[in-house]
Amino acid sequence: QVQLVESGGGLVQPGGSLRLSCAASGFTLDYYAIGWFRQAPGKEREGVSCISSSDDSTVYADSVKGRFTISRDNAKNTVYLQMNSLKPEDTAVYYCAADRLFTVQAMCDMVPGVGDYWGQGTQVTVFA
């Protein structure tokens, strides 16, 4: 069964850290660009960070630059999102997606049709 499973979400105070994981099963991530996206209540889903399959080039949303780091471990078939200095506005459901077609920039821009596979999401809540 082909699937992506996110984990690592939770409750954290402002300034805290979380590391999200996106584990693939049923296919190998080696040939896919992987993106992290988030959707807050009442808002559209937005691209947070994406990493390429070829040269590990990365893209970050301006709102998370310098705080979040995306990385991949192909041996574990897993992609991570390290989130530091978390803010209440980072509160959202975080999703990962895999795509073989689009560039990382296009993926994070959420062009129509992006994402061959999507996970079910993991909740991140940042509260004082």
Image (cartoon, rainbow, N blue to C red):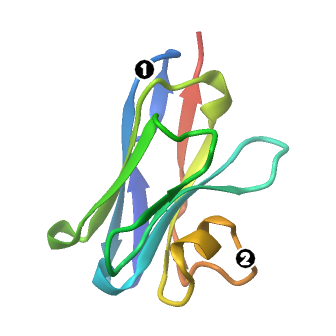
**Alpha-carbon distance for marks 2 and 1?**
31 Å
Residue 41 higher or lower than 127, as above or below: below
Image quadrant assignment for residue 41: top right
Give how far across and how far down residue 54 sits, in percent.
33, 81
Residue 27 higher or lower than 104, as above or below: below
Give how far across and how far down residue 121 sits, in percent.
54, 55
In the image shown, does 29 or 51 lie closer to the viewer?
Answer: 51
Residue identified by numbered label 2: 111
Residue 27 visible somewhere in the drawing: no
Q: Name the residue: 33% across, 61% down.
A: 79
Q: Name the residue: 68% across, 66% down.
A: 109
State the quadrant of the C terminus. top right
Image-based side of 73 in relation to 99, left or right: left
Mark 2 or mark 1: which comes first in sequence?
1
The single residue placed furthest to the top in the displayed view is 128
Image quadrant assignment for residue 45: bottom right
In the image shown, does 76 or 62 lie closer to the viewer?
Answer: 62
Give how far across and how far down residue 32 sits, in percent.
40, 82
Do tag 2 and tag 1 residues touch (Cβ < 8 Å)? Answer: no
Crowd class of label 1 (few under 14; some 14 to 19; many from 20; radius 10 Å): some
Residue 58 visible somewhere in the drawing: yes
Residue identified by numbered label 1: 16
The single residue placed furthest to the left in the displayed view is 75
The three-letter code of the residue at mark 1 reads: Gly
Q: Kindly state the secondary structure of the residue where label 2 is placed.
A: loop
The three-letter code of the residue at mark 2 reads: Val
Q: Name the residue: 46% across, 34% down.
A: 67
Frontmost of labels 2 and 1 is 2
Give how far across and how far down residue 87 sits, in percent.
58, 23
Image-based side of 106 in relation to 41, left or right: left
The single residue placed furthest to the right in the displayed view is 42
